[in-house]
Amino acid sequence: MSHKPLIAIDAMGGDEGVSVMIAGAALARHRHDKFRFLLVGDQEKIEAALCDHPNLRDASEILHTSEIVSGDDKPSQALRKSRGSSMGLAIDAVKRGQASAAVSAGNTGALMAMSKLALRTMPGIDRPALAALLPTLIDSDVVMLDLGANTECDARNLTQFAIMGAAYSKIIYGFNEPRVKLLNIGTEDQKGTGTLRDASDLLRSSTGLPMDFQGFIEADKINRGECDVVVCDGFSGNIALKAIEGSARFVTDLLKRSFTSSLRSKFGFLISRPATELLRHHLDPNNHNGAVFLGLNGVVVKSHGSANEKGVANAVEVAARLVEKDIIGRISSSIDHINAENVNKESDGK
């Protein structure tokens, strides 16, 4: 791989568009001067934004297009724009080897559809999964997948998600054997659907995988720091994610209302401000930004549409780290291992 990762940025995606995407890329470049960028979008708007970021201008190329994928576009509509839109061209740059990874804050469904069509799934992977980092009570975040790419999954899919999530966690935090659990309605072996129990059996019986599979976890324990990877189908994962995000906003809004309800409360806020600032920082989604489509023949990172420049910079850093640490090679190695193990089991059973 090139010593200097080149990241394709869909400059037109996200709620704020070009200004925030360029500012985020500039911040990532400031933190890591080896990063280079392919900025995809309206050249005039990109060049105007670059006026405030000369350090980024010196490390960037611009690929012009005025066509964008809107937040309202259905995946089928977006696919028709794949050849000419800023999102499609950023992904295509990864496919052609022009860029090491792509980052977009645009339409999630469109990004997944385009990425899957252009990059295809890795050998041995049936379906790609959307993985994200969620805050916990310990120093490291928890990797959770799938978060909406696949509403229905079988035991084989969940096993592959576990392998991909473990590889991601290992790269981000350096764990030798990340603790992996399946999301379920209880922790007992007999709880949950047959699919979950079958996936648990598959993971328990597989040896030599770079993970520590620890069975089931309930939704109220996701943020406790009791495991490093939570695996689920996309339907359950998306519901759990939205519930966690909503609860975080509820707590912060409730605190804000409480601290402004009276003069005494305002005085209490001044005293407790260091603690509330720490809480705000910990719950800020920009500090955990950068969901990843795992299982594709290329690295694509989804930045939250409402992310600020710090959030975009974090997404760019996630993309670069996955390229540098060879996420695709690590997943491929584990998939080959479990497939070979299954072949041996079938041979022994004959």
Image: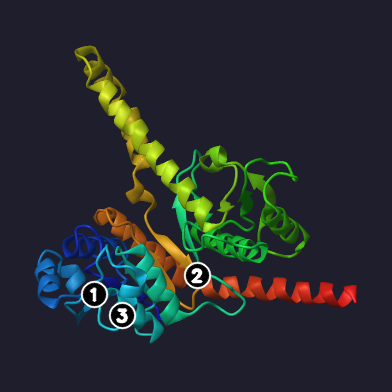
Left or right: residue 51 versus residue 21 is left
Give residue 288's position: percent from left, percent from top.
39, 51
Location of residue 102 with respect to 170 vertically, above or below = below
Location of residue 245 with respect to 112 vertically, above or below = above
Residue drawn at x 62%, y 42% is 185
Give residue 251's position: percent from left, percent from top.
36, 31
Contact check, label 3 and label 2, Cβ < 8 Å: no
Residue drawn at x 75%, y 63% is 206
Q: Which residue is mark 1?
A: 39
The CA span between labels 1 and 3 is 21 Å
Mark 1 or 2: in front is 1
Q: Which residue is mark 3?
A: 80
Disc 1 marks a residue whose amino acid type is Leu
Disc 2 marks a residue whose amino acid type is Lys
Contact check, label 1 and label 2, Cβ < 8 Å: no
Q: Mark 3 falls on what kind of element? A: helix
Q: Which residue is mark 2?
A: 325
Would you say residue 202 is visible in this rendering? yes
Q: Mark 2 falls on what kind of element? A: loop
Location of residue 113 with respect to 149 vertically, above or below = below
Q: 313 or 122: nearer the eye?
A: 122
Residue drawn at x 51%, y 54% is 235
Would you say residue 282 is visible in this rendering? no
Mark 1 or 3: in front is 3
Q: Earlier in the sequence, mark 1 or mark 2?
A: 1
Q: Earlier in the sequence, mark 3 or mark 2?
A: 3
Give residue 299's position: percent from left, percent from top.
43, 72
Give residue 248's position: percent from left, percent from top.
38, 38
Contact check, label 1 and label 3, Cβ < 8 Å: no
Disc 3 marks a residue whose amino acid type is Arg
The CA span between labels 3 and 2 is 33 Å
